[in-house]
Image (cartoon, rainbow, N blue to C red):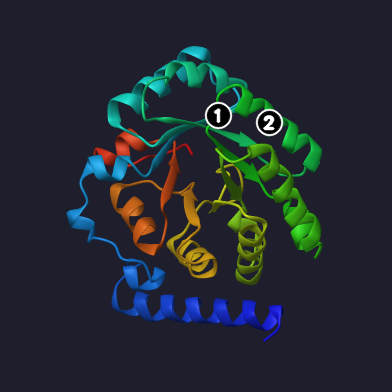
Amino acid sequence: MDEKELIESITKEVVNKLKSENTADSSCSAACSGQPSGSRSSMLPGELAKYIDHTLLKPDATASEIDKLCAEAKEYGFCSVCVNTTWAERCSKNLSGTDVKTCVVVGFPLGAMSSRSKSFEARHAIEDGANEIDMVMNIGALKSGDTKAVEEDVKSVLRACGQRTILKVIIETALLTNEEIVLACQICKKAGAHFVKTSTGFSTAGATPEHVALMRKTVGADTGVKAAGGVRTFEDAVRMIEAGATRLGTSGGIKIISGQTIESGY
């Protein structure tokens, strides 16, 4: 089976499974992802918090808002704070001595900058204390069929990450076909990325359980999947986890774990 046939096979399998599940249940169940998970009713707010990257990426974020973000992450036990690289050092200092990680975005939000620039940005952020890098894939290169450029782009940032820094690759699912999502995930996995991530939150749409399930099916059990953008409620969050997400990106984590609905934001 060649690469094109493999992509078509994976896509059809997941899409057909999702259709059959949706006929019986409007939510995306654990069967969609092939991963074990608890029921929605069994997950506690504190458990859900451990999945969340507490996010503030708006361009007008202030120092006091970043300090508040870090304080909230410590109070509620979120996995990380996710910020632009200019705030890496401040967050690292704020979170020193805690289990909360500093996650920064690179090549954000378009992914259209050069690999050299992305690598420099990642390296500088790590020097400032970043533990995790969320880079944006070169989406235009993927759509142009230049898979080698996409892979080298990921590898260049991975080299900057070294052995101790987690790399997540944002593939921007809203701009891709199902076949392109499968291909992007295959490239990221081959390149050695630790996670694939659905969205920047700055494009036309965010994560869906269907896309998360497709990504999980493609990368298997040993690569993380981060769902970001479009997670508005506790139920939304757990559906993403049931579909295969191992991390969630949201600016409304406090409302989500409190059972409230996010009306706007990432």
Horizontal arrangement in the rendering, residue 244 relative to residue 152 (left or right): left
Q: Earlier in the sequence, mark 1 or mark 2?
A: 2
x 74%, y 50%: residue? 138
What is the spatial separation of the Cα atoms under label 1 and label 2, in whole angstroms?
Answer: 9 Å
- The quadrant of the image that shows the N terminus is bottom right
The disc at residue 123 is 2
Q: Identify which residue is drawn at 41% across, 61% down.
A: 244
Q: Position of residue 233 (x, y in %)?
A: 32, 47
225 and 129: which one is in front?
129
| Residue type, mark 2 in image | Arg
Q: Height in image: 266 above or below 63?
A: below
Q: Nearer the viewer, residue 107 or 234?
A: 107
Task: Please name the residue that numbered disc 1 is placed on.
Answer: 130
Secondary structure beneath label 2: helix
Q: Give the residue at the far top of this rendering.
A: 64
- Residue at 48%, 51% in the rendered image: 226
Vertical order, 226 against 26 (above or below): above
